[in-house]
Image: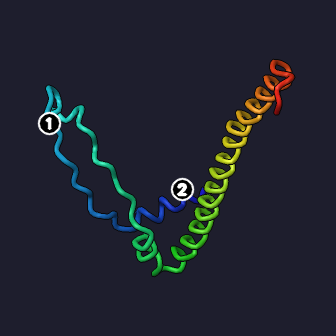
Amino acid sequence: MGNAGWKGLEDRAEPPAPVETEPKPKDGLSFLGIFSPKPKKLPPTFEAVVRANKDEPSQLATLVVFGSVRAVGELSKGVRVLAEGIDVFVGRYLLLTTVGYVGLKFVHYKLFDPFPL
């Protein structure tokens, strides 16, 4: 919801200048423009969005509401990515070390029982 509202606020702001890309060598059908990649539209900067929407009170209220909702969404996305990273670490590497330790102890006590360790 916050992202959709923020996109509406971005429409009022001026987009940054397009970035020039290197021209690609022409192949058989690129002269028609069919297979040539379309230039990506860069979103305006945060400062440009604020400048474009700060003059009218209704737009300023919309900026505050959707900006805060988007900020909370981005923060929760960061927390989710961090929690998934910790989950992958625990699920993958801690499991592997546990299985390795159990295997080592099995070899130590069952196969080499009189071993002096």
Q: Residue 60: give its label.
A: none
Tell me the amino acid under the disc marked 2.
Ala
Its colouring scheme is rainbow
Q: Which residue occupies the foreground of this view, 107 or 103?
A: 107
Residue for point 64% across, 63% down: 72
Q: Which residue occupies the foreground of this view, 110 or 39?
A: 110
Q: Is residue 21 above or below residue 43?
A: above
Query: Counting other residues with Cα less than 10 Å from the Cα at mark 2, is it few (<14), some (14-19), or many (20 or more)?
Result: few
Query: Counting other residues with Cα less than 10 Å from the Cα at mark 1, is it few (<14), some (14-19), or many (20 or more)?
Result: few
Residue for point 26% across, 57% down: 19
Q: Where, by quadrant of the figure, is residue 115 drawn?
A: top right
Label 1 and label 2: CA atoms lie apart by 38 Å
Total labels: the figure holds 2
Q: Quadrant of the N terminus?
A: bottom right
Where is residue 67? Give x, y as percent: 56, 68
Where is residue 73? Give x, y as percent: 62, 58
The residue that disc 2 covers is 4
Residue for point 48% across, 61% down: 8
Front of the two marks 1 and 2: 1
The residue that disc 1 covers is 25
Residue for point 83% across, 30% down: 116
Counting residues from the start of the chain, the first of labels 1 and 2 encountered is 2
The answer to whether residue 18 is left or right of residue 27 is right
Q: Secondary structure at mark 1?
A: loop
Q: Are the residues flagged by discs 1 and 2 in contact, CB closer than 8 Å?
A: no
Q: Is residue 47 above or below residue 112?
A: below
The answer to whether residue 108 is left or right of residue 51 is right
Where is residue 61? Give x, y as percent: 57, 75
Tell me the amino acid under the disc marked 1.
Pro
Residue farthest to the top?
111
Q: Quadrant of the C terminus?
A: top right
Where is residue 77? Give x, y as percent: 62, 54
